[in-house]
Amino acid sequence: MKVFNTIVLTCLIACVLTLSGCNQSGSNQLSDQAEPIRFSLAQMPINLDPRYATDAASERANRLIYQSLVDFDETSNLVPKLANWLMVSPREYHFIMKQPFARFHHHKTLTADDVKATYDSIVGLKDSPHTSEYSNISSIQVKNENLVIFQLKQPDKQFAAKLIMGILPKDYIEKEHDFSHHPIGSGPLAFEHWQNKLTLKRVHDGQQIIFTEVKDPTVRVLKLLRGETDLLQSDLPPELVKHLQSKPEIMVQTVQGANFSYLGLNMQDPLLKQHQVRMAIAHAIDRQAIIEKVMVKSTRVAGAILPPEHYTNAGNELIAYDYNPELAKKLLIEAGVQLPLKLVYKTSTDAQRVRLATILQAQMAKAGIDLEIRSLDWGTFFDEVKKGNFQLFGLTWVGIKTPEIYTKAFGSQQFPPHGFNRGRYVDVELDTLLLAEDWPAVTTRIHQQLPYIPLWYEAQFAAFNRNITHYTPKPDGNWDDLATIKRSATINSYAH
């Protein structure tokens, strides 16, 4: 197994900086608001239409481009965004637009008509993974520009929490505008252009934010140290994070994370359909060792999609599956599996994800599992996952706030493109618990049946030059502080 060598890595960075920095002057002039703020990403957004976006980068960018009727505060409590609401009954909700009205980036006022048009369009889409979330809507009525009324087919006391979709302008919905590549919202950042790089402009002061994809983590770090990028967030191995922490010109901030990493399983696979096989995989992974060796400090072992501090987990402790390769072998033999069990694991080409896959491969080998790794470019990999073309895959649920995720991820009627049940899991008992919204029982059932293998809640961190201020990473990894981030008008000196 290949493991990063910190000394070699540090020397490599130093050598590259020395060779490439000799022709530079000893200072780098950056003036306040005069230059774009450059954000290097491991993966670019795929779709800037909130009705279709499901990948983390797209969701994070869309939070800044669009605004929703409601949002969640830092403790995951529901709060008004564009509108206040009143539950007249569990089947009727009134949303009253806040004053003054928000304005779209094409200068049109955002009213109740745009809310209706947005949700009507989602309900009518055939290929959106979010459509099923709103299948309970019976009708949407606009009483006036201030008031929109949602009537439901079935009672739903949690309905308001589902209205987190970014609102699109009615006039452009009617034109069948390509929001995926030319978004028009009302959020703090407006779309400018997107070719190889995505450029957004902050509405209140014109500050440009340029997003660039740099897949290689070492190259991302080099770009930050060379002043060729201003901001990195997550997706770095801990050795590189520690290296950045040693640089006086770089600020690194770390917070405890809430995003859930897991192994997805194809529940239609004849081997993985067997509960004993899934339990064997769970016992074949040493999560704590991985966290200690290759994850950022403050990463936690996970038990369910929503973290322990979420209200659905109150008094419902989920004990992590311990690393026990001998027990894993025993379970496989009892299931009638001929050892070694051969499985194919799909992941992206991101260096850290490939590294984690390699460690999983080595750990599972001790449990009698021969794990073949197939790393694919992000777009191809994610498409394979949505199509169900996998045995095992690794992904992370990002920014999840409400327990309805369990319905979307494991409900038997939630196969893509109608939902996120990518493993095609069917469990009548779980469906009953989901319908009753008995969340402690739901999480316990999922933890027992293992339609996925829980891994960890990865800590979040951001690294940036010290002339960058007003930016802090969020536990869910969102980029919300791009609405406030600033570059100071200072001169930074770098000794090469």
Image: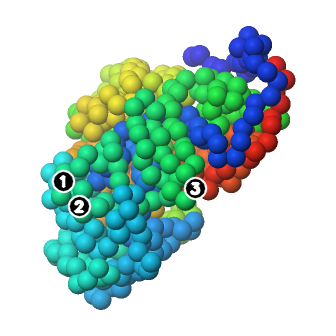
Query: Considering only vertical position in the picture, is 215 above or below 63?
Result: above
The answer to whether mark 1 and mark 2 are in CB contact below 8 A is yes
Q: Quadrant of residue 287?
A: top right
- Does residue 55 show up? yes
Coordinates of residue 118 in the picture (x, y in percent): 26, 63
How crowded pointer 1 is (Cα within 10 Å; few <14, some 14-19, many 20+) is rated as few
Under circle 2, the secondary element is helix
First-in-chain label (2 vs 3):
2
Q: CA distance from mark 1 to mark 2?
A: 7 Å
Colouring used for the render: rainbow
Q: CA distance from mark 3 to mark 1?
A: 30 Å
Residue drawn at x 30%, y 89% is: 88
- For badge 2, the amino acid type reads Asp
Q: Quadrant of residue 9?
A: top right
The answer to whether mark 3 and mark 1 are in CB contact below 8 A is no
Which numbered disc covers residue 205? 3
Taking the image as shown, residue 90 lies to the left or right of residue 397, namely left
- For badge 1, the amino acid type reads Lys
Coordinates of residue 112 in the picture (x, y in percent): 29, 75
Nearest the viewer among 99 and 323 is 99
Coordinates of residue 37 in the picture (x, y in percent): 60, 41
Which numbered disc covers residue 175? 1
Query: Considering only vertical position in the picture, is 10 above or below 399?
Result: above
Query: Considering only vertical position in the picture, is 136 above or below 428?
Result: below
Instruction: Point out the image quarter for the N terminus.
Output: top right
Q: Kindly identify which residue carries mark 2.
A: 171
Residue drawn at x 32%, y 81% is: 146
